[in-house]
């Protein structure tokens, strides 16, 4: 899902968007405040640092929701939570997002990742 050059990268930003937002009642990242969605404020701020930016989602379905509602051209890519025999599809936890993110970043030669939640 990630298309980046093969050169060694130093740092990538990771925005965790895979939560259920149970207390909020809807996906926080897609909630509009003023004329922008909450996630767009974060994307704007992080893009000022000129590092690659990845959104870490729970599923392909969630990625589609974001692609349909935000300007995603300033995002390097999406990382989807890994699911295997240890991580079942219905598990949502920031640790799974971090695990999946750092595993993916390592494949693409990033040295560090800075993760924040949406």
Image: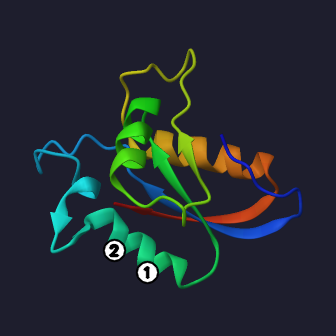
Q: Residue at x 10, y 45 (%)?
A: 25
From this view, report whether residue 54 is shown above or below residue 40.
above
Regarding mark 2 in the picture, which secondary structure is present there? helix
Q: Which x, y percent locates residue 77?
A: 60, 52
Local crowd size for mark 2, using a 10 Å CA cut-off: few (<14), some (14–19), many (≥20): few
Residue 88 falls in image quadrant: top left
Callout 1–callout 2 Cβ contact below 8 Å: yes
Q: Nearer the viewer, residue 53 or 99?
A: 53
In this rendering, does residue 99 appear at all?
Answer: no
Q: Which x, y percent locates residue 90?
A: 36, 22
From this view, report whether residue 1 is shown above or below residue 41.
above
**Disc 2 designates what residue?**
41
Left or right of 14 in this view: 28: left
Quarter of the picture holding the N terminus: top right
Left or right of 113 in this view: 74: left
How far apart marks 1 and 2 lie (CA) works out to 6 Å
Check residue 45 in the rendering and tell me which mark sits there, or answer none.
Answer: 1
């Amino acid at each position: 899902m990630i298309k980046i050059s093969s050169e060694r990268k130093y740092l990538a930003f990771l925005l965790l968007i895979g939560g259920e937002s149970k207390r909020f009642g809807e996906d926080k990242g897609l909630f509009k405040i003023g004329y922008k969605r909450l996630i767009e404020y974060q994307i704007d701020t992080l893009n000022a640092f000129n590092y690659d930016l990845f959104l870490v989602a729970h599923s392909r379905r969630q990625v589609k929701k974001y692609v349909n509602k935000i300007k995603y051209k300033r995002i390097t890519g999406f990382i989807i939570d890994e699911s295997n025999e240890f991580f079942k599809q219905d598990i949502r936890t920031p640790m799974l997002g971090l695990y999946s993110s750092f595993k993916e970043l390592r494949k693409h030669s990033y040295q560090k990742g800075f993760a924040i939640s949406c």
